Image: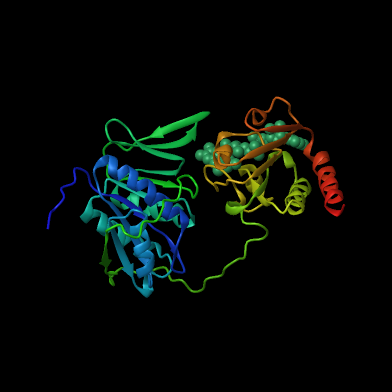
Amino acid sequence: MTTVEFRHGPVWVIAEQIEGRVRAVSFQLIGHARKLADELGAPVEVILLGESLDEPAQQLIAAGADTVYLGDDPDLAFYHPEIYTEMIVRLAQERQPEIMLIGSTPMGRELPALVAARLRTGLTAHCIDLVLNENMILEQKVPGYGGLISIICPERRPQMATAARGVFPSPELDTSRPGRVAPLVVPKEIPHRIETLEIVREEPEGVPLESAAVVVAGGAGAGDPGGWREIQGLARVLNAALGSTRPAVDEGWTELETMIGQSGKVVSPELYLGVGLSGELQHMVGIVGAKVMVAVNNDAKSPVFEQVDYGIVDDCREFVPVLIEKIREYQTK
Ligand SMILES: Cc1cc2nc3c(=O)[nH]c(=O)nc-3n(C[C@H](O)[C@H](O)[C@H](O)COP(=O)(O)OP(=O)(O)OC[C@H]3O[C@@H](n4cnc5c(N)ncnc54)[C@H](O)[C@@H]3O)c2cc1C
């Protein structure tokens, strides 16, 4: 048997599963981790915690993992911050990863912060690109100061970052790839201060954002709940998914799940219609994959018009109800 010496510690991905299905973002991060690891001359190691995951573990190898550390135990079936953190921290102290990547999901908003604090390292959330510079340091790119800024963690390890689904492409699965699954044991002495009593699933209303062919996104220009209801109505008549900017969420007009952008979801519809929003980079990075983009804004000088294919200068409070009426007329013809 030949032993391969690696110059750098492994590139890690913390995979996430829900009811035994690994989330798409975990596959996408493994695909990107593979590229980074090949540049570094390092292996890709994936941590997968849950229950009954033999088959998903093989899929992660097919996606690019060299080793999958698999914690398979009923105690791990649902995300548990204390147990997950402890297991990841202990293994990281042993394996000394160079890089650790996690999806920007609800779990990915909490778990990496807990792990980073325990490992006394840095963490960059909601990255929209991750590249190695000439010194083989990970440049963690996020929108800022009207452009993209690179955040680095030059001294501490691992270099930790989160990225949303859709930021990196899904890798082709190659079931002939070699790789190994290493079992992880759940330490039973960890305090269980948190207990999952019940899982309540809310069925999302309307069309899911990530897979929608048409997205109607509303912004602060909606003005009030009445204006927002018009934008919701427009999404309904177009059979579109409803998206939003941060101010619409902050105003309480819509849920956080609808927010598109750096801290929200990444969408790639055939048609994106942005209503009453200014085209700030933190929102626009979430729609880079859209094919045709249209904006409605009452300010002809709004920066959003420089970024879309078609612009409509009008008050959305007046324009949207008329547009809904015209679409209905067209649909009943
Ligand atoms: C770290 C960080 C992360 C962030 N992440 C996100 C993110 O993921 N997603 C996100 O969306 N934002 C995010 N933001 C916030 C972002 O920077 C912007 O503040 C936000 O996108 C602006 O939303 P908006 O376009 O709706 O509001 P505004 O910038 O206030 O624009 C409102 C627009 O509506 C127009 N308008 C007003 N009235 C009317 C009318 N009657 N008819 C038509 N048009 C009208 C105005 O001309 C204006 O252009 C983030 C910010 C930070 C600092």
Residue occupying image coordinates x 39% and y 65%: 56
Display colour scheme? rainbow
Residue extending farthest top:
301
Count of all numbered marks drawn on residues in the image: 0
- Residue 300 pos. (x, y %): 73, 26
| Residue 68 sits above or below residue 261 on the image | below
Q: As rendered, which of 51 and 194 lies closer to the eye? A: 51
160 sits left or right of 284 in the view: left
Quarter of the image with the N terminus in it: bottom left
Q: As rendered, which of 69 and 168 lies closer to the eye? A: 168
- Residue 285 pos. (x, y %): 54, 38
- Residue 265 pos. (x, y %): 55, 48
Q: As rendered, which of 248 and 6 lies closer to the eye? A: 6
Residue occupying image coordinates x 34% and y 53%: 64
Q: Regarding ligand 1, which quadrant of the image does it lie in?
A: top right
282 sits left or right of 6 in the view: right
| Residue 187 sits above or below residue 138 on the image | below
| Residue 279 sits above or below residue 87 on the image | above
Residue extending farthest left:
1
Residue occupying image coordinates x 78% and y 39%: 316
- Residue 207 pos. (x, y %): 65, 57
